[in-house]
Image (spheres, grey):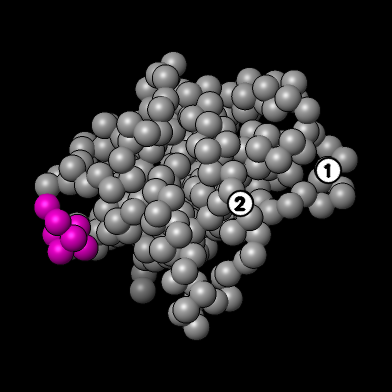
Amino acid sequence: MSGSVRTDRYRVKEGEKVSLVAWSPDDTSGFRGGEAEGLVESKKLAMKLERLQEVLYAEHEHKVLIVLQAMDTGGKDGTIKKVFEGVNPQGVRVAHFRTPTPEESDHDFLWRVHAQVPGSGEMVIFNRSHYEGVLIERVHGLVPRKTWLRRYKEIQHFEHLLHEDHTVVLKFFLHIGREEQKRRLEERLTDPSKQWKFSLSDMQERKFWSQYMKAYEDALQKTSTESSPWYVVPANKKWFRDVLVSSIIVERLEELGMEYPKPSADLKSAVI
């Protein structure tokens, strides 16, 4: 547990049955304090993450993959902006997975993902991910049922391969409520600074809310493992979302026991 945040309660245990109705998107009980205290905690965590990411880059042994999934307006961009604002861009990058190109569609659904996974010393954030293959493609019937059913096992194998290759995999479902999504969409319509984000397709996707919730439940239940866990992040309150995600990442990186590498030169003989 990192600081005053109880992170484990938001982790989906391997084999656990998931019902998102039981996970309140308004929940902030995992933190001892309110928004003001949360903002202070976020700054402390940002400083820790900045240092840990620097050691990760310098040590050049481990790899870190952060997966962010959410419904439209769920806060993926906001999470990236707030949680990772202090890290060195030299060792961190964001990968986006939009509609597959014709070339990508000609290969298996993980083909384009392999090219984006982190290298040694690198942290990569997936803004959407390989899970689109069991979410949007399932909900809209873009692939046969037997195909998306098979993909759960393929995802497990893929993530196990990453784990065996010294990759820390942390997956976050940013869980917002349907009414909160409506409020955020309406805000995009009226706020000139957010209108560029608005898409009519977002309104169409709202019609499939229940189908998406079922698809997310199955994905969380079938692919949360000890080595590649899912976390359900209550995301109606942005400050709590940021505190929880930051805490989980910092907690996991601290467990690695990373250290700066020893200098290759004899520093005692160095003359300046």
Q: Is residue 4 visible from the viewing direction of this image?
A: yes
Task: Provide residue 143's location: percent of width, then percent of height.
Answer: 77, 33
Query: Residue at the location (29% across, 56% down)?
Result: 237
Please, what is the three-letter code of the amino acid marked with disc 1? Ser
The quarter of the rendered structure image containing the C terminus is bottom left
Q: Which mark is residue 105?
A: 1
Q: Is residue 193 left or right of residue 136?
A: left
* Residue at the image point whose x is 37% and y is 33% from the top: 21
Q: Identify which residue, 55 or 18, lies in the foreground.
A: 18
Residue sitting farthest toward the front: 207
Label 1: which secondary element: helix
Sort mark 2 into few (<14), some (14-19) or many (20+) by Cα contacts within 10 Å. some
Q: Say if the magenta span includes residue 267.
A: no
Location of residue 6 with respect to 38 vertically, above or below:
above
Q: Callout 1: few (<14), some (14-19), or many (20+) C-alpha neighbours within 10 Å? A: few
Q: Main secondary structure of the magenta part?
A: helix
Secondary structure beneath dot 2 equals helix
The magenta-colored residue range is 33-39
Return the residue at label 2.
205
Seen from the viewer's position, the closer of residues 119 and 231 is: 231
167 above or below 222?
below
Q: Give coordinates of residue 134: x percent, y percent.
A: 64, 33
Image height of 81 relative to 220, above or below: below
270 displayed left or right of 145 = left
What's the distance in space between the residues labelled 2 and 1, CA to CA? Answer: 22 Å
Residue type for callout 2: Glu
- Which quadrant of the structure image shows residue 155? top right
Q: Residue at 14% across / 56% down in the picture?
A: 34
* Between marks 2 and 1 in the image, the one whose residue lies nearer the viewer: 2
x, y percentage for residue 133? 68, 37
